[in-house]
Amino acid sequence: MWDTILWIAAVIIGIFGVLRIIQRDFIYGAVLIVIALLVGPGGVSIFS
């Protein structure tokens, strides 16, 4: 269950990161995308 919650959270954070990059806020967008990668997909989770 936690895997699903973390994956959904990572997707949401990643979407916000992409939106920030589209709005030309590159640093904040990149930080959000890196956080999304650390939280969820690929089994790379900072919570495990």
Image (cartoon, rainbow, N blue to C red):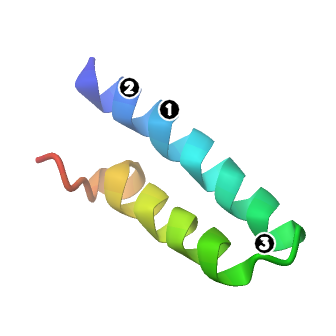
Mark 1 crowd level (few <14, some 14–19, many ≥20, 10 Å Cα): some
Numbered disc 1: secondary structure: helix
Label number found at residue 8:
1
* 8 versus 38 height, above or below: above
Which residue is at a point 43% across and 37% down the rendered structure image? 7
Q: Residue most toward the left? A: 48
Mark 2: amino acid? Ile
- Tell me where residue 30 sits by quadrant: bottom right
Numbered disc 2: secondary structure: helix
Mark 1: amino acid? Ile
Mark 3 crowd level (few <14, some 14–19, many ≥20, 10 Å Cα): some
Proximity of marks 1 and 2: CB atoms separated by less than 8 Å: yes
Which residue is at a point 29% across and 31% down the rendered structure image? 3
Q: Is residue 35 left or right of residue 31?
A: left
Mark 3: amino acid? Ile
Which residue is at a point 52% across and 72% down the rendered structure image? 31
State the separation of the CA atoms marked 3 and 1: 20 Å
Find disc 3 in the rendering and name its residue: 21
State the separation of the CA atoms marked 1 and 2: 5 Å
Q: Which is nearer the N-term, disc 3 or disc 1?
A: 1
Q: Position of residue 38 (x, y in %)?
A: 34, 61
Q: Is residue 46 left or right of residue 10?
A: left
Q: Which is nearer the N-term, disc 2 or disc 3?
A: 2
